[in-house]
Image (tube, grey):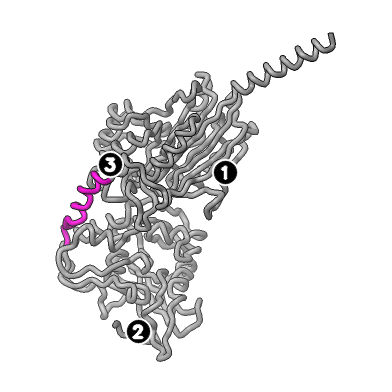
Amino acid sequence: MLRKAFTLAALALLTVSLTQAQDTFRLTLLHTNDTHAAHAPNSAGNGGVARQAAVQNQIRAEGGNVLLVDAGDRFTGTLFHTLYLGADQVQIMNALGYDVMTLGNHEFDNGDDVLLEFLNGINFPAVAANIDFSANPALDEKVSPYAVLEVGGRQIGVIGLTTADTQFIASPGEGITFSSDYAAVTNAAAAELTEQGVNIIILLTHTGVQVDFDMLAALENVDVVVGGHSHTLLSNLFRAPENYPYTVKNAAGQTIYYVQAGANNQYLGRLDLTFDANGVATAASGDVIALSRYITPDETLDNIVAELSVGVEALRNQPIGASTAVDLVGDRTVCRIEECDLGNLIADAMREYAGTQIAIMNGGGIRRDIPAGEITLGTILELQPFGNLVATFEISGTDLLAALEHGVARIALNEQGQVKREGGSGRFPQVSGMRFSFDPTKPEGSRIVSVEIQQPDGSFVALDPEATYSVATNNFIRTGGDGYTMFKDKAINAYDFGRVDYEVTANYLASLGTVQASPVDPNNPRITIVNAEVEPRK
């Protein structure tokens, strides 16, 4: 009898164990964000959609439940978008097998009609819970606050958010409005999904990592957040500000997992999740996967990119509607140690585009001269090849002075006391809307002699350490690149997601028509070196 009871107890335990195993649901979440039409590999041969496809194929071959999502900003950044205006994304995203996406601000860059054409072409849903599209019924029909997907027999709810700044930095149609009450909007959508019996909920955000981090603890019934907009790389393997996944507990004690995968199709995120019968995530692990040049590209996607590239290469040779009557200097031996033609032009372009008081361009981001004659788009792309975005912020006069000191800190002298042309630092600041002088014979940190800010009437007044100035630059140095930590740490009202830099420069040059003379005026210099001459150019 005892033996029989033991056998029955063991059978009951086995039954419970089998039931629990059946109720356990495992999901592999693959995610991208801010790909910005970077379909082809970069100059080092890394990244691109063909390598993404190869990795996805391998993961899907494992036989598990796989969901592929995107957190927005597929548009704008390369000539693929300039030429195809989203038609390239339709072909590529459908071929990659995306399941759902949210909209980024750059999806609105070209107006409602282009966005609608894209949405009509993709064969998966787009979600954005904080956008009111009722002023455009066609778009309203195509974009929902959330989608319910069935994966492996389980229903999964996916909610979307798009930065409310889109109404100021892109071109949404009249009457389309954006809510910035992100947590409330998300919780309302999650409550609807929960009422429908959906207990696994993913949030796709195109609002930026800091906004997301501030919001996470206020979320309800959300299991996973896939972020975008800030181009943030979270990783355990690669240098990153936080581990992958980043975790936060909400007020109810629920763990929320947060991931983001950099930008420009250089990484594919993989988050492996385990849920219990009630949809509670009991385990999560994973990391971003670098789309290395050592990965053999998928043939299908490789062929699609090759076909699209034919038109792109032709576009590279097209004139931008501008020419120059003089050779424009952008050589590193000039732009990294003194005022240069293209430093002035690029800085002027950013300042006009952003409407700020001043603009600063790092000399290291200027990569070639432009010879006299017609200017092509390919030339502009070679001039500014990194696809940085125009950033704006405000900063105190004291911190602006510190930035200029940093910018000239690496200027070195040769044995004759001349400023050395070779070895100049990429941090050297090319400027617009201001002028400054520096003494390279002084110790680092005390080289700036004078700084003056241009006024609306064209006159200049001395920098006021207590004043606050509006600045345009690129998102690379605004976020601390080239050692500009003061821009990262001391910026006020920073916004890093304007138009791509080469487009801003090309549009500015086109507005000039023909550059008649060197933008460097020796009678009115923007940058003056005192107590030292510069080595002659070789």
- N-terminal of the pair, mark 1 or mark 3, is 1
Q: Are marks 2 and 3 in contact (CB under 8 Å)?
A: no
Residue 433 in the magenta stretch? The answer is no
Q: Are marks 1 and 3 in contact (CB under 8 Å)?
A: no
Q: CA distance from mark 1 to mark 2?
A: 50 Å
As drawn, the residue found furthest toward the bottom would be 416
For residue 304, the mark is 3
At 37% from the left edge and 33% from the top edge, which residue is drawn? 97
Instruction: Tell me the quarter of the picture where residue 462 sits.
Output: bottom left
- Judging by the rendered image, the residue that carries numbered circle 1 is 246
| Residue type marked 2 | Val
User: Helix, strand or loop at disc 1?
Assistant: strand
Q: Which residues are magenta?
A: 306-322
User: Helix, strand or loop at disc 2?
Assistant: loop
480 up-or-down from 450: above or below? above
At 28% from the left edge and 77% from the top edge, which residue is drawn? 524
Circle 3 crowding by C-alpha within 10 Å: few under 14, some 14–19, many from 20: some
Judge from the rendering whether residue 343 lies leftward or rightward of residue 477; answer left or right: left
Residue 66 coordinates in the image, percent (x, y): 47, 32
Circle 1 crowding by C-alpha within 10 Å: few under 14, some 14–19, many from 20: some
